[in-house]
Image (cartoon, rainbow, N blue to C red):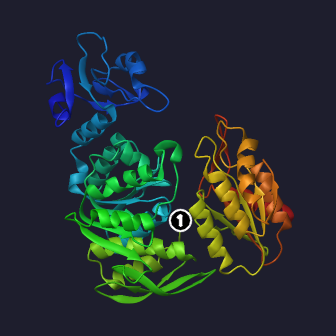
Amino acid sequence: MKLIDVMKNLDIIDFVGEKTIEINGIAYDSRKADQGYAFVCIEGLKTDGHQYIPQAIEKGAKVLVVEKDVEVAPNIAVIKVKNGRKALSRMGANFYGNPSDHMRIIGVTGTNGKTTTTHLIKQILETNRVNSGLIGTLSYKILDKEYKASNTTPESLELHRLFHEMLINEVNTCTMEVSSHSLELGRVADVGFQIGVFTNLTPDHMDFHGSTENYKRAKTMLFYQTTVANIINIDDPYGNEIAEEIKRLSTNLIRYGVNKQADIYAENIQTSSKGTIFTLVTPKFSGEVKIKTPGMFSVYNALAAIGVCYALDFSFDQIKEGIESFHGVSGRFELVPNTGDHTIVVDYAHTPDALENVLKTIQGFAAGKIITVFGCGGDRDKTKRPMMGEIAGNLSDYCVITSDNPRTEEPQSILNDIEIGIKRTQCKYKMILDRKEAIREAVRISKENDIVLIAGKGHETYQILGNTVIDFDDKKIAQEILREEV
C-alpha cells in the first residue's frame, strides 16, 4: 500500500519525504520493524519509542511517525503528528482496509463481568450459526484459531489486523472486551462499534485514571462510538448516570437489570450451587431461563448478553438455547474437580466489588464455613487492599492472606495493607506469603461442607514475582495438594 493511502485522515503537523513510496507494514516495536515498514514512535508509560529509531531504520523502516523533531537520513520519510497512538490507530485501520466498517463489532466495558459476558454473547451467536470472533482477557479467537492475549484490549494495530483476519475467514461478527485503558489511550478510536455494553463500575485502576469520575468518563467513551444500540445496566448507579447521559443519542438504548423499570429484566430469581433460574422479561417476549452458574452477578452477565442478542432481533428460543448451553469461563466461579469431599472454587475476583459478589453468592448456599484465600496485585491501586481485606473478613469465616502478583513491590507490604481492613472485622485469619502454602493451609483446615474460595487470579497460569514470571495455576495447585492428601 502506498504511503499516501496509509496517511489518509491522519492529523499531520509536518511531513518530509515521498508520499508515493510503498509501505509493506507498520510497527511500533522496533524489534518487529522490517524492510519497507513505517515505524510509529509512541511515548509509553515506561519507555519512549523515539529512542528506538536507529534500530527500526536498521531493520529496514523507510517511514517514521514521530511526535518530536528528529534528524535522519534524507531517504527516510518523516511524518510529525501530535499523538503517536492516535496516528497508529488511524494508520492501522487504513493499512488493513478499515475492517471494522465491514463487520458487526460488539464492545463490552465495565469493571467486572466483561469476560463472561463476551463469552455468553459468543455462545448465543454460535449456537445460532453465526461465525463470531472474540477478543478479550483470556485470548483472541477466530474460528478454531486461538491467540494468547497480550492485553484485555490489544493495541490498535493488532486489533485491526485481527479484524482483517476475521474477514478473510468469513467471520463478520466480533465480540470484544473494551478496557478503560484502551478507550483512554485511543486503541479503539477507529473501531466501528455497532453495539456497546456497560456491565458495572466500581473503583479500579485509580493509579491510571486518578479518580472514579475519570474512570467512568473513559468507559462512557464507548457509547459515543456505537451505531446501533447501547445496552446499559441501570441497577448500577454509574450505569444509570451513563444511560441518562447517552439517551439523547440516535442509537437504541436498552436498559437492563432486575429492577422492573428496566427494558429487559429478571424476576423470580432462584439460585443454588448448581446454577440459577429466572424469568426473563423483555418488551417482546418473556420466559424461564436457566444458567449453569450461581449468583446475582451471573444473572447480570446473562442479561447483558441477552440485551445484545435482543438488539440483534434474536428470538426468545434462540437466546434461551444459547444461554442454557453455556458451561462457564475458565477461572470464573470454577469448581476444582476432586474425588474427595472438598469444595474449592477458583475465581478471578480481584476488585472489592467482584470479591463481595462471589462471597455473597457462596453464602447463599454454603452449608459449612467459608475459607477465603486471596491477595492483591503489586504496582497497582493500593486503596482497594484494605477494602478487600474488610470485605473478605466480613463475608468469610476464615481468611488466608497471601501473594497475588506482587510484581516489583515488597510482597509483605501488600499483605500488611490488606491486614488493615481485615482487622476491622471479627474474622480469624493467617498471613502466608507463599501462595501455594496458603492454598495448602486452606485445604488442610477445611472440613466436609466447607467451601474454599481461591480468589484473585482465576484463569491466570503464572505469578509475577519482581520481574520474573513463574508458572502458577491456582486450580492445578489445588488439585496437586488434594492428591497429596490421598
Quarter of the figure with residue 438: bottom right
- The N terminus appears in which quarter of the rendering? top left
Is 15 positioned to the left or the right of 233 in the image?
A: left
Q: Residue 215 in the image: x percent, y percent?
A: 44, 51
Quarter of the figure with residue 341: bottom right
- Residue 348 visible within the image: no
Q: How many marks?
A: 1
Residue under the image location 19 percent in, 32 percent down? 7
- Residue 444 visible within the image: yes
Q: Residue 454 in the image: x percent, y percent?
A: 69, 61
Classify mark 1: residues with Cα within 10 Å, few (<14), some (14-19) or many (20+).
some
Q: 216 or 163, which lies in front?
A: 216
Q: Residue 51 in the image: x percent, y percent?
A: 42, 19
Q: Please, is residue 338 above or below residue 260 in the view? A: above
The amino acid at mark 1 is Val
Residue under the image location 36 percent in, 81 percent down? 261
Q: Residue 307 in the image: x percent, y percent?
A: 35, 74
Q: 427 or 12, which lies in front?
A: 427
Q: Secondary structure at mark 1?
A: loop
The residue at which mark 1 appears reads as: 329
Q: 334 or 234, which lies in front?
A: 234
Residue under the image location 76 percent in, 64 percent down? 425
Q: Please, is residue 15 above or below residue 361 in the view? A: above
Is 450 positioned to the left or the right of 246 in the image?
A: right
Residue under the image location 75 percent in, 47 percent down? 416
- The C terminus appears in which quarter of the rendering? bottom right
